[in-house]
Amino acid sequence: MKRVCLKHPDRPHCAKGMCRSCYRIHRRRNNPKYRADQARIASAGMQRRRAKLRADVLDALGRQCACCGETIERFLTVDHINGEGASERRRNRREGLDYLAPYSQIVAAGFPRDLYQILCFNCNSGRYLNRGICPHRETFGVV
Ligand SMILES: [Zn+2]
Ligand SMILES: [Zn+2]
Ligand SMILES: [Zn+2]
């Protein structure tokens, strides 16, 4: 029988019962530098800095979903209007900046409203799953 990943039966085996992507994550988790980064990120000072940056971004861009008007802060996320979120996240992760970066970059850029908007989780993932248009907008015919 062909060996496959224990977590992903559809992917070929690479090492230690894992596929290539699982093995890459496994190696990263066991990397002392990665562990040190995680410890730093979990520190209270870092959490406070992140909360402060997030609050600044929400204050500047509006504490409301640009699509449906949701105002409960826990639901709100920052959305890249041109849909570059994923590639930016990848780039940040490579550079080990992913924890503060999404917010600190927006602050550094001066909160450009033509690049970022506030969306709730619903509208954010709805937009992602629906080729860039939140299903709300389709239903109401407003594009
Ligand atoms: Zn896998
Ligand atoms: Zn919304
Ligand atoms: Zn929506």
Image (cartoon, rainbow, N blue to C red):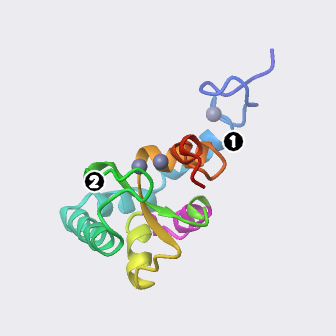
Q: Nearer the viewer, residue 137 or 110?
A: 137
**Tag 1 residue:** 20
Image point (62%, 24%), residue name = 6
Residue 59 at what x, y percent from top left?
Answer: 27, 72
Q: Nearer the viewer, residue 126 or 13?
A: 126
Residue 2 circle label: none
Confirm or deny contact between disc 1 and disc 2 (CB under 8 A). no
Q: Is residue 26 visible?
A: no
Residue in the image at 45% along x and 54% along y:
67
In this figure, which residue is indicated by the disc labeled 2?
71
Task: Please name which of the two marks, 1 or 2, marks the residue nearer to the observer.
Answer: 2
**Residue 105 as seen in the image, left or right of residue 27:** left
Disc 1 within 8 angstroms of ligand 1 (CB): yes
> Dot 1, how many residues are within 10 Å of its Cα: few (below 14), some (14-19), or many (20+)?
some
The local secondary structure at tag 1 comes to: helix
Give the residue at x 67% y 28%: 5
Task: Give the mark nearer the N terminus: 1 vs 2.
Answer: 1
Q: Main secondary structure of the magenta part?
A: helix
Q: Report how far apart the C-alphas of labels 1 and 2 lie in the structure.
A: 41 Å
Relative to 16, say whether 78 is above or below: below
What amino acid is at disc 1? Arg
Bounds of the magenta segment: 87-98
Q: Quadrant of the N terminus?
A: top right
Q: Is residue 90 magenta?
A: yes
Callout 2: helix, strand or loop?
loop
- Is 36 above or below relative to 12? below
- Look at 20% across and 68% down and name the residue there: 45
Q: Position of residue 85 (x, y in %)?
A: 56, 62
Q: Amino acid at mark 2?
A: Thr
